[in-house]
Amino acid sequence: QVTLVESGGGLVQAGGSLRLSCAASGIIFSSNPIAWHRQAPGNQRELVAFISSGGTTSYADSVKGRFTISRDNAKNTVYLQMNSLKPEDTAVYYCKSFQYWGQGTRVTVSS
């Protein structure tokens, strides 16, 4: 079975940085596209970043230039490096591959 587990969330000040991790079992990340989504209270879940099986990346306009998605094939793990964080980045962040979702990790950015 496929399991995705996010970690690395927490409380940070505006302007700070945080790196989220998504560790997978039952699926090979190097062969699959991976995405990070987020959902804030009262908002729809939105796509934040995407990396294809070939390594091509794409970002939402709201995070472009601040967030970076990457993967470590040896560890079967994907990352979301978040820099210059803003209060509006506050949300629960989820990783996803095909129809599989993780449980999410909460990020809170204080002003």
Image (spheres, grey):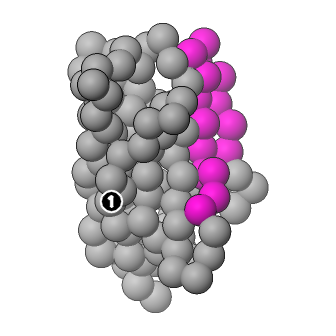
Does the magenta-highlighted stretch encompass residue 95?
no
User: Is 91 left or right of 104, judged from the image as shown?
Assistant: right
The answer to which of 11 and 5 lies nearer the viewer is 5
Q: Quadrant of residue 106?
A: bottom left
Indicate whether residue 46 is drawn in magenta: yes
Which residue appears at 31% of the width and 38% of the height? 4
The answer to which quarter of the image holds residue 62 is bottom right
Identity of the residue furthest to the bottom in this view: 111
In the rendered image, the vertical position of residue 67 relative to residue 57, given as above or below:
below
Instruction: Residue 42 in the image: state x and y as whole percent.
Output: 58, 82
- The disc labelled 1 sits on which kind of residue? Thr
Q: Is residue 16 left or right of residue 76?
A: right
Q: Is residue 99 visible?
A: yes
In the rendered image, residue 17, in percent from the top left (x then y), is placed at: 39, 60
**What is the x, y in percent for residue 50?**
60, 36
Q: Residue 61 sits in which quadrant?
A: bottom right
- Circle 1 sits on which residue? 105
Q: Relative to 13, is 92 above or below?
A: above
Which of the pair 2/8 is nearer the observer? 2
Q: Secondary structure at mark 1?
A: strand
Task: Please tell me which residue is depicted at 57% across the width and 77% down the height of the picture.
Answer: 88
Seen from the viewer's position, the closer of residues 27 and 18 is 27
The quadrant of the image that shows the N terminus is top left
Q: Which residues are magenta?
A: 45-59
Q: Is residue 84 left or right of residue 50?
A: left
